[in-house]
Image: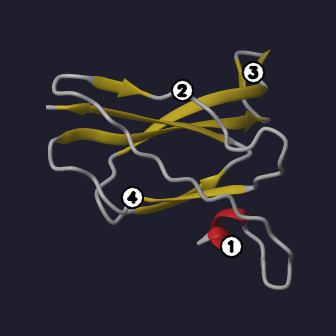
């Protein structure tokens, strides 16, 4: 999966892995909105893989928001140069057993959930 996201062959390349486990504790009626972030402050983390091994039955959401930074090189509107970057937000509805892999350099992310 990581090779498809990064569009390169990773065999024979020394890699580092970061493993995180998160447990969100919310009370009935509470909502959790995580901070938009990239993984790793000083490490060169190229991609992130997330596995949702368990989601309690009362939790609604558990959505993952991806905020992708996209380069706009060739867009001209009415003679005005519109080059630069744009942020595209996508929300992924996740379920128990889902695996998601995405580029860490260009995709900031956060989790949102609430307890019904």
> How far across and how far down the image is residue 18, in percent?
68, 58
Vertical placement of residue 7 versus 45, above or below? below
Residue that extends furthest to the bottom in the rendered view of this protein? 12
Within 10 Å of disc 4 (Cα), the crowding (few <14, some 14-19, many 20+) is some
Vertical placement of residue 3 versus 38, above or below? below
Q: Mark 3 = which residue?
A: 82
- Mark 3 against mark 1, which lies toward the viewer? 1
> How far across and how far down the image is residue 20, in percent?
57, 53
For the residues labelled 2 and 1, the Cα–Cα distance comes to 27 Å
- Mark 2 against mark 1, which lies toward the viewer? 2
Q: Name the foreground residue: 54 vs 75.
A: 54
Q: Mark 4 = which residue?
A: 52
Q: Name the foreground residue: 74 vs 50.
A: 50
For the residues labelled 4 and 3, the Cα–Cα distance comes to 39 Å
Within 10 Å of disc 3 (Cα), the crowding (few <14, some 14-19, many 20+) is few
Q: Mark 1 = which residue?
A: 3
């Amino acid at each position: 999966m990581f090779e498809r996201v990064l569009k390169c062959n990773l065999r024979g390349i020394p890699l580092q892995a970061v493993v995180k486990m998160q447990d969100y504790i919310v009370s009935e009626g509470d909502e959790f909105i995580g901070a938009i972030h990239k993984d790793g402050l000083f490490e060169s983390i190229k991609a992130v893989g997330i596995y949702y091994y368990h989601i309690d039955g009362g939790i609604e959401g558990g959505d993952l928001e991806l905020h992708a930074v996209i380069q706009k090189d060739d867009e001209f509107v009415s003679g005005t140069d519109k080059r630069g970057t744009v942020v595209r937000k996508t929300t992924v509805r996740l379920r128990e057993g889902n695996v998601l892999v995405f580029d860490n350099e260009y995709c900031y992310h956060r989790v949102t959930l609430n307890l019904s």
